[in-house]
Amino acid sequence: MTQRTNKTGILAFEQEPLESNDYTMQEAIKEARRCLQCAVPQCRRGCPVKNEIPQFIHELALGNFGAAANYIANNSDLPAICGRVCPWEKQCEGSCILEKKGKHIEIGKLERFVADTVMDAGVFPCTSGMKANGKVAVIGSGPAGITAAYELARRNYEVTVFESDSEPGGMLMFGIPAFRLHKNYIYREIDCLQKLGVCFQYNVKIGQQKSIEDLFAEHFEAIFVGIGASAAWSLGVDNDTLPGVVDAQIFLHQVQQVQIGKGDITQLPIQAGDSVIVVGAGNVAIDAARTAVRLGADVTIVYRRAEHHMKCLPSEYQAAKNDGVKFKFYSAPRAVVGATCVEGLQYEKQKILEDATMVPTGEFGVVPANKIIAAIGNRPEMDCINALQVNASNEGYISITEKPYGMTSRVGVFAAGDIVHKPATVVLAMREGKKTAIGIDRYIQAKHLLEGIKQFSNISHLTD
């Protein structure tokens, strides 16, 4: 990652190109023509949103980009983003019948090729109608919130998105590094939403600048909550509050602030020359490790289990190794070493019994480091949950109903995404955002119907 001075004069990172190996038009059509058009498409079974994969690939093979885009739009509101960050190897591509021969169709690349082609041409389904069905507030502009806003706007609702940060996108903007998802793709989605009539208000945190009562007083008929789960779990070992212990999500957020010109690179917790340990083995841990490497740090991931137990995608693991990240397996963190600042991480070696049980060996060691990044998961911010005044678990995850889908214990307040289903993938948050938006539509339509019946009954009573 190179560095440059941005328009504000603050040193920032150059966002690396993501798809240097993306298709030309001829290559995309050639790849699409490899599809067998299976009678029972396993690729679609592997897709959480049940994208019409064979149909869009067939149209692409014929050169019908508009028709291909329409098939994608039937089930996916964020194809250009999903085509970049979805775990295809565990979903559509992993289910492709050709995967058995090691030559699955590159579904993710084809999806983003179609989305990019039609969006750059300005012909992606993105038209606005009369906003006659009512007003809906969307809290949070992460994948669940953006998807809900898309779905509601297309159903002719007046939608306002309230975002606590200064930029849109939630974890898309601040949780996924720019080398995996260039932020221009997020801004392009926001432009499309604005063309649909969606309004955005930034630096508005529910419970501080506005309350749920304020929103209802502003005549919003329903409220969608998609605030994610951004509070960090502590490392959970002795001495873990020592200066130099950093949360992965906070670190990634700070890096992105620098990249958009709203932060100073010299204030980042990781600097060139640092020796960094990352605790965790999910995709966030990999993202944090690869980001630290790009800042010039020497990085080791410490994980208590084996390589094949890692939660991250195999492709991300390989990418981290290619970047120079080192791995130390069978090493359970026990304590942060140091008196006034981080000097290393003490670990206990683990072994696996014949029944696959992991047990400690009583043998300890220390990995030297001056910084430790904790990437062991996140949870909801309890002050936000309390401000919503809805039923939630002890951990803060909101409870919802099936009918109407997504409604909380508070009438008219709906929720979806990580705040309901715990941190998961972008595509799952997107799926739940869409389902909940449909639930909101049904709720408001039923509400209007009952109000009409009540009004009609009152008129009939007066004329009797």
Image (spheres, grey):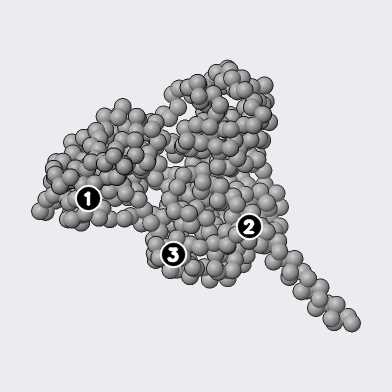
Residue for badge 3:
393
Residue 260 in sight: no
Residue 307 in the figure: left or right of residue 190: left
Type of the residue with mark 3: Ser
Figure check: 419 above or below 317: below
Residue 439 is tagged as 2
Question: How many callouts does the rendering have?
Answer: 3
Point 69% across, 66% down: residue: 447
* Residue 193 image point, x, y percent: 58, 46
For the residue pair 186 and 402, the one nearer the viewer reads as 402
Instruction: Check the image and name the residue furthest to the right.
Output: 464
Q: Are marks 3 and 2 in contact (CB under 8 Å)?
A: no
Residue 20 in the figure: left or right of residue 129: left
Q: Are marks 2 and 1 in contact (CB under 8 Å)?
A: no
Type of the residue with mark 2: Gly
Residue for badge 1:
245
Figure check: 352 above or below 40: below
Question: Split into 4 quadrants, where in the image is the N terminus?
Answer: top left
Assess disc 2: are there few (<14), some (14-19) or many (≥20) residues with their C-alpha within 10 Å of its C-alpha.
many
Give how far apart the Cα atoms at labels 2 and 1 are.
42 Å
Q: Quadrant of residue 353?
A: top left
Point 17% across, 45% down: residue: 361
Give how far apart the Cα atoms at labels 1 and 3 are.
28 Å
Of the residues under marks 1 and 3, which one precedes in the sequence? 1
Residue 413 in the figure: left or right of residue 362: right
